[in-house]
Amino acid sequence: MLSLVGGIRVARLMIASTVLWYATLLLFVQMQTVPTAIACLMLTGFSRSLAMISIAVILMRTAAENFRGRVMGVRMMVIYGLPLGLMAAGSLIEEIGFAATGTLYAMGGLALMLAVVLRWRADLWSVHAPANAR
């Protein structure tokens, strides 16, 4: 997929697709009809996949060859923490409702992405950054 968008810098693609992912999640939790919710979920899934692929590409490009397995192992440990957040979401949905929980999670994701971009902007946004190499 990334080869289809060869003119786009990967780190910038990761940032944009992650923002789109959380923005479409914010839209999804407010949907009132099934057809629009399905369309929104399709766009959410596409942007999430693009973000995850971009992250993997950046990790593989920037990690030394002898550390790639370790880096991907740590990435998997982070991703496997997802069920804990999902269990917390189930409890929150019971307490405050689906729309409020979804909004809280999506806003949290956007806030954390903004923090990452601000903290590592030179490593992610610069055209000459290793993460943006072609």
Image (tube, rainbow, N blue to C red):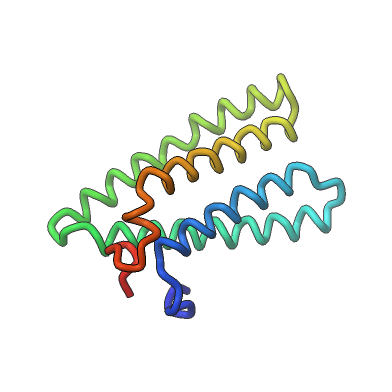
- Residue 126 is situated, as x and y percent measured from the top left of the image, at 36, 62
Residue 55's place in the image compared with 90, above or below, is below
Observer-nearest residue: 99 or 118? 118
Observer-nearest residue: 115 or 105? 115
**Residue 66 placement: quadrant:** bottom left
Residue 98's place in the image compared with 53, above or below, is above
**Residue found 24% across the figure and 60% down from its top:** 62
- Residue 116 is situated, as x and y percent measured from the top left of the image, at 41, 44
**Residue 54 placement: quadrant:** bottom left
Residue 20's place in the image compared with 132, above or below, is above
- Residue 39 is situated, as x and y percent measured from the top left of the image, at 75, 60
**Left or right of 21 in this view: 70:** left
Residue 92's place in the image compared with 43, above or below, is above
The C terminus: image quadrant: bottom left
- Residue 111 is situated, as x and y percent measured from the top left of the image, at 53, 39
**Residue found 71% across the figure and 19% down from its top:** 95
**Residue found 30% across the figure and 57% down from its top:** 59
**Left or right of 30 in this view: 61:** left
